[in-house]
Amino acid sequence: MDVILIVIVTSLVIVGLIFKDFKSEVYFVGTIDILFRLLHKLIELINIKPLAKIINTYIPDSLESLINYYSSGILNTILIWILFIIYCYFTYFLITYWLKKRK
């Protein structure tokens, strides 16, 4: 699980350096969390034991579970609130994009 944390943090830095805006970071975090949740739902639905073992071992259930695994106490609470705020931004950006596309 340590590797996935390193990959996510490195990817966040790379996305920040390439796109240089907060919106891209928010989309990246939202996309990664959705990907984690979809992978776990997929292995639950298809029920292939070797694949399920690999995904359950190396990929967290969500970003919240990753935060809970690596932190505790007040730091955990702060990080969960930051993640919640990022989810709110992500939802806001998706809704505004959707409303602009409707016109």
Image (spheres, rainbow, N blue to C red):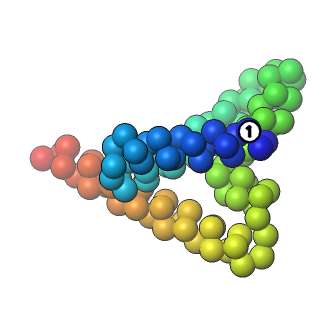
* Residue 31 seen anywhere in this rendered image of the structure: no
Give the answer, above or below, for where 50 lies relative to 32. above
Query: In which quarter of the view is residue 8 placed?
Result: top right
What residue is at 73 percent from the left and 54 percent from the top?
65
The correct choice, above or below, for 10 with respect to 63 in the image is above
Q: In the figure, 51 relative to 31: above or below?
A: above
Q: Quadrant of residue 69?
A: bottom right
Quadrant placement of the N terminus: top right
Number of labels in the image equals 1
Residue closest to the eye, 52 or 70: 70
Which residue has dot 1 on it?
Answer: 3
Q: Which residue is drawn at 27% across and 48% down?
A: 98
Answer yes or no: is residue 30 visible.
yes
Q: Is residue 51 left or right of residue 20?
A: right
Seen in the image, is 36 located left or right of residue 3?
Answer: left
Front residue of 47/77: it is 77
Residue found farthest to the front = 17
Q: Position of residue 43 (x, y in %)?
A: 74, 29
Q: Which of 102 and 90 is in front in this view?
A: 90
